Image (cartoon, rainbow, N blue to C red):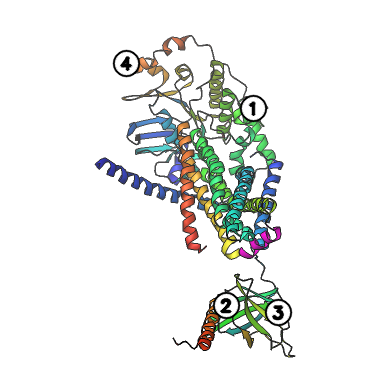
Amino acid sequence: MHASALQQEDAASVEFRDVAMAFGNRRVLQGLSCEFPAGGISVILGGSGSGKSTLLKLIGGLVRPQAGSIRVAGEEITGLSERRLQGVRAKLGMMFQGGALLDSMTVFDNLALPLREHGRGLGEAAIATAVHECLEAVGVRNADALLPGQLSGGMTKRVALARAILSRPRILLCDEPFSGLDPISSRRIEALLVEINRRTGMTMIVVSHHIASTMRMASRILILLPDGAVAGTPDELRRAGDPRVVSFLDETLEVAETDAPVEFLPIGLNRAV
Amino acid sequence: MTRSPTRDFLVGCFVLAGLAAIGYLSVSIGGLNYSGPGGLLLYAVFDETGGLKPRAPVSISGVKVGQVTSIRLNDDFRARVEIDVDRSLELPVDSTASIVTSGLLGDRFVALSVGGDDQLLRSGDEIGFTESAVILERLIGKFIHNADLDSNQEGGKGE
Amino acid sequence: MANAVQDLGWAATRFVETLGQMTAFAGNIGRAVVTRPARYRLWVDELFKLGVLSLVIICVCGLAVGMVLGLQGYTTLSRFGAAESLGAVVGLSLLRELGPVLTALLATGRAGSATTAEIGTMVATEQLDGLRMLSVDPIHFVVTPKALAMIAVMPILSTLFILCGIGGGYLVGVELMGVDGGNYMSSLRSNVTFRDDVAGSLLKAVIFGALVGLIATYRGYTARPTSAGVSSATTSTVVIASVAILISDYAITALWGV
């Protein structure tokens, strides 16, 4: 295990090499190789069914690829057992599309769960402090006793985000964080993500179909097209001559220019340890 | 994990009620007993047990004092019945063990009649005086047989 | 014709495959039982949901079944002049068969389907994936408390069913039909033994509880993550568990010598 100690620099990056993924007879990914650099916000774009969410599941080890290698935080995860995977997942945080909060538990208990499970003897007071700090950071107040079913869409996303960042992960995975939200709430989530990344240097890999915000916040974009994948920075892609990319990004070329600056919300997180 | 004291209380009641129900069913109705004092092991040999089963009760004057532990065939083809009764009982050596039926068609059990001797039975002793079970069919068969004999003698009719 | 045979073969293979998967699933649950931390809180919650909330239906149905047994039993027994043995007839029928089996079937419909729906919905809304990402094993956290609770709850519910049934038989036989109350209870007491009847009844209840617990959690866990998938998993739980209960009832009865 000495080799991984030397790779501290890319300890927060994800690397795909020649990954193939199929569900039964349906081939979703084929020969995919790409890199999600540490400390940046990478966005995965693509049409429905293109395999975007599957990529996140592959990174989290929730599904296994048919072929290829995936390195998460410097560690190869494709052959790992479930128990070893849990060690890798300790460095990850995942914000699910529907929130995926346990609907039989209150917001507080949902957030306290990982601390109670793995907190190694943290007292209830310390847990409460940590939970409230995270909720404050995402701008959620007075929601402790609410059940997930009682939260609005925007609040659900923010609580899900709070739960994902609670354990100070090195890599944050977000599955469609803007889906189902009105434009104002969308902007809030976007601002939150950008701010967290700025303050803590947390690597973020976001799956989205919202092109405007992607162009604003991403440092690297991966587009999954029916016949292949294209990767690059927002500028590179905007200037790309490839007709597929152009038609995909078509709608953004007007919108991106007229964007109002994103407002930053006050957040109280320190740089990740 | 919303802690609700009401819920916990109800679950506690539920479990207690359940255990009480099982206990009632087992002891009061099922007759499970922590096998009383017991400890005095005796045996008796019968010509006929008539369907006596192990764990059948052993009683004195209708009061249960123990149970049958095993029934085996001994070397001269008679039934050796072993019983386990309350060790505080003082049974004289001339006590009798009989296999009787509860009611006309009921189960068999062992009834002990207390004797009058000064000497007492000790664990491992044999109860010398026994009365075997009465088999209803044999009784009826005997009755018919005797009736035939009577009618033969009277009428002098040959077979 | 060839298609029918092919389909049959395929179905048989699928069946054996599913049995294998369920055994593996049961093994996982077994392993989770002995893994810390012990989830007492969740187990108590499940005892509430599966046990306490089923009390009303169990007791009402028990009473009703007991009353029917009392009525039918009296009618039949009095033809042979044996009406005073009503207590034994009602008690033994309930203890040996009707109590464990009917309780298990009722529990399958109520608690089993609720369990499947709950777990299935958690799969569909990615809650189980969420748990995995938090390094919490969903089998340990969600499935095991539910399965264990089902096993613990079944003998309790079964016994309560039986007692309500005996009471129902008493109501009809003694109060309505004129059987002597003392005879009812004494014929019951003298014909019921712990070894043969009560222990067998409890054993059946525990085994049925394990079957329902396993089937309900398995179907929920492997449900397709759509609302149609959850609903189909729920109905198949009821069907499969019911069949399993009735078949194993025969097997246990034959093996136990009851």
Q: Residues within 10 Å of mark 2 (few under 14, many from 20)?
A: some
Tell me the kind of residue under disc 4: Pro
Q: Nearer the viewer, mark 3 or mark 2?
A: 2
Q: Quadrant of residue A104?
A: top right
Mark on residue B70?
2
Tell me the kind of residue under disc 3: Arg
Q: Are discs 4 and 3 both within one chain?
A: no
Q: Quadrant of residue B158?
A: bottom left
Pick whichever of labels 4 and 1 is earlier in the sequence.
1
* Residue located beneath label 3 in the image: B87
Is residue B144 in the magenta section?
Answer: no
Answer left or right for B52 relative to B15: left
In this orientation, which residue lies closer to the viewer: A49 or C122? C122
In space, the residues marked 3 and 2 are separated at their CA atoms by 18 Å
Start-end of magenta stretch = C179-192
Q: Are discs 4 and 1 both within one chain?
A: yes
- Say which residue appears at 75% left-offset and 90% top-offset: B118
Mark on residue A243?
4
**Can the viewer see residue C26 in this picture?**
no
In this orientation, which residue lies closer to the viewer: B107 or C136? B107
Toward the left, the furthest residue is: C2
Q: Secondary structure at mark 2?
A: strand
Q: Nearer the viewer, mark 2 or mark 4?
A: 2
Q: Are marks 1 and 2 in contact (CB under 8 Å)?
A: no
Q: Nearer the viewer, mark 1 or mark 2?
A: 2
